[in-house]
Amino acid sequence: MHLFKTNKMTSLTEDVRCSAMLCILTVPSTMTSHDLVKFVAPFYDVMEHMKIIRDSTPNQYMVLIKFSSQADADSFYTACNGRTFNSIEDAVCQLVYVERAEVIKSEQGASLPVIELAELPQCTVCLERMDESVNGVLTTLCNHSFHSLCLQRWEDASCPVCRYCQTPEPVEENKCFECGVQEPTQSISIPMISSMKAKFKETIDRYDNLERRLGELAKDEQSMDKKCGQLSTRVTKLGQELKEKQEMNRCLRANQVQLQAQLAEDEHKARETVL
């Protein structure tokens, strides 16, 4: 799924025709259809159609909403954009105006760029769509884009995607390629190197512990599956034995009734013979 925008930016305060259709970019998958309808309930009378769509991004989906007029769409945008879905979820409602939605097959060039339109990138940290008109977007030297707030939480100086270092490495001869003027070199202090080594070792140890824990959980899962199989077999066997004993008990009761009737008949004949 590709999202494109016009390169020309317009202000919401200007008297410019936008669209009567809006898209909620990221709705958490924990929100059911009932929760979604409850969220848009105040504007239900002016909504013509609401369609849930999703791509391969996990744990979220998008919603297209068609309103009766642009004024209704503007009212919904003003009231709901940036608003949290509920008191439990941290996610907020991120709205964009949609001019049109097209369904194009792969063989018809669905993945090709659209002329005079720019595709909205996706932040690889929070997996949300990015629009510099709404969010601060930072593009690194390796041409990967992120939300500025998401990149602030990344303590390393490398790119979260390809690990490319964004700062130049110190060299012995740090000079300008144009004029040849040499600049003073900057060296990394020994305490900084020790801190980086300790942090790297801590990360490796944490990864090893997680991997070891994952192996233990996998073994526990196999053991539990084996025990469940054994218990299931035992239950099946006990059920068969119970059925066999019930059938045997029924036969013994029938034989008992038949023998009692035969005994009563024999006693009756014996008394008649004595008389």
Image: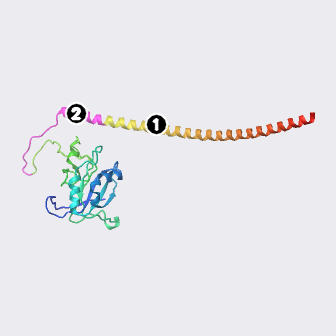
Q: Position of residue 261 (x, y in %)?
A: 81, 39
Please check the rendered image and state whether residue 191 is part of the magenta-colored stretch, yes or no.
yes
Q: Amino acid at mark 1?
A: Asp
Q: Does the residue at mark 1 contact the one at mark 2 (Cβ under 8 Å)?
A: no
Q: Which residue is mark 2?
A: 195
Helix, strand, or loop for circle 1?
Answer: helix
Helix, strand, or loop for circle 2?
Answer: helix
Picture quadrant where residue 165 is located:
top left
Picture quadrant where residue 246 is located:
top right
Nearer the viewer's eye, disc 1 or disc 2?
Answer: 1
Q: Is residue 157 left or right of residue 103?
A: left
Q: Residues within 10 Å of mark 1 (few under 14, many from 20)?
A: few
Q: Position of residue 161 (x, y in %)?
A: 27, 48
Q: Which residue is pictured at 21% across the width and 34% down the height? A: 193
Closest to the observer, 36 or 120: 36
Q: Residues within 10 Å of mark 2 (few under 14, many from 20)?
A: few
Q: Which residue is pictured at 18% across the width and 64% down the height? A: 17
Please check the rendered image and state whether residue 19 is part of the magenta-colored stretch, yes or no.
no
- Which label is found at residue 212? none
Picture quadrant where residue 185 is located:
top left
Q: How far is disc 1 from disc 2 in space, using C-alphas?
A: 37 Å
Mark toward the start of the polypeptide (1 vs 2)? 2
Q: Which residue is pictured at 52% across the width and 39% down the height? A: 228
Q: Which residue is mark 1?
A: 220
Residue 134 lies, with reference to residue 206, above or below; the image says: below
Closest to the observer, 55 or 36: 36
Start and end of the magenta stretch? 178-203
Q: Quadrant of the N terminus?
A: bottom left
Residue 50 lies, with reference to residue 180, above or below; the image says: below
Residue 70 lies, with reference to residue 259, above or below; the image says: below
